[in-house]
Amino acid sequence: MATLTNSTLPSLGTPLLSRIGNTPLIRLERVAAHLPGIQILGKAEWANPGGSVKDRAASAIVADAQQRGLLAPGKHLLDATSGNTGIAYAMLGAAMGFPVTLCVPSNVSPERKRILQAYGANVEWTDPADGSDGAIRKARALAAEESEKYFYANQYGNDANWRAHYLSTANEIWKQTDGQITHFVAGLGTSGTFVGTTRRLKELNPAIQCISMQPDSPFNGLEGLKHMATAIVPPIYDSALADRNVEMETEAAYIMAKRLGRTEGLLVGVSAAAAVATCLRIAEEEAAKGKEAVIVTILADAADKYLSERFWSE
Ligand code: PMP
């Protein structure tokens, strides 16, 4: 096995932002309790100061842009986002003192709208019918029209996004499992989490099975995730990295979200629930083969921002 190297995210100089990363790895006690020799572990990414896994990528993108002089004083950070990256940028802008402009589909939950406003971000609302692709097109147009004003962060094509996970998430998981991880599962949005974590885990132990997960349809309720076959494919995505790709049904994610709340005491977002549902499928397959497994996934955020969704009360 390879040895561990540097696992830190770049310092952004404020105590709040030094709290990004090093999240707890939580063992799910009940979901796989019926499967002997199988553990499912989740990275509690809501423990980041902005409340999601996207603090890692956003802070790495900002640090990289500052180092390269792209986010000079007075420039606005501009990007397209349907939620968590926008919240992370808005928090970073407020803490570090740069303006933030976000292109966001107007059907995001009211909770998200309020959070962005509370951090003081400027928001350009885009047509929900155009999904996240509409927000991307709007950001590209603004960046082209006013290149003096904006630093276009372009999370979908920015290598600092996946590198954040290569340098932090993967090494944390390796350390927290004492190198015992056998499977890694992550949902695909920009794909930064999956691509960066997988690249590093495969260096540490090429036998680790890395499984990407995406919604089974473009019309899904798995906020934060992309149906790659119909979306603008992110330039940082590399489909060859996955040992396997699982397509998850929204309904199965909703059922798992409720189950995690009631049986584990974990109120997670729907993409996290979809990730755990994927882990459970893999766990059942491994158990059926009589194998032991340590399956690690990313719990991208908590349920707070989604509590107005109807499935919670159905
Ligand atoms: N889950 C949630 C809730 C997200 O907001 C995101 C980011 N869009 C993801 C998963 C996927 O992360 P990534 O962009 O790194 O693929």
Image (cartoon, helix red, strand yellow):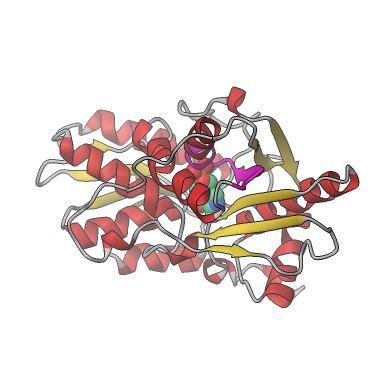
Residue at the spot 63% in from the left edge and 58% down from the top edge: 41
Residue at the spot 42% in from the left edge and 41% down from the top edge: 4
Q: Is residue 305 above or below residue 3?
A: below
105 sits to left or right of 10: right
Please state, as top left, top right, bottom left or bottom right, where the C terminus lies in the image.
bottom right
Magenta stretch holds residue 193: yes
Magenta stretch holds residue 199: no
View extreme (left): residue:
73
Please state, as top left, top right, bottom left or bottom right, where the N terminus lies in the image.
top right
Instruction: List x then y, in percent, for residue 145.
Output: 24, 31
Q: Is residue 16 above or below residue 226?
A: below
264 sits to left or right of 144: right
Instruction: List x then y, in percent, for residue 82.
Output: 47, 50
> Could you tell me if residue 90 is visible in this image?
yes
Q: Nearer the viewer, residue 78 or 165?
A: 165
27 sits to left or right of 191: right
Residue at the spot 71% in from the left edge and 57% down from the top edge: 39
Instruction: List x then y, in percent, for residue 234.
Output: 49, 30
40 sits to left or right of 290: left
Instruction: List x then y, in percent, for residue 102.
Output: 34, 49
> Could you tell me if residue 127 is visible in this image?
no
Q: Quadrant of residue 163?
A: top left
Q: Nearer the viewer, residue 249 or 171?
A: 171
Report the span colored magenta. 180-195
View extreme (right): residue:
288
* Count of residue discs: 0
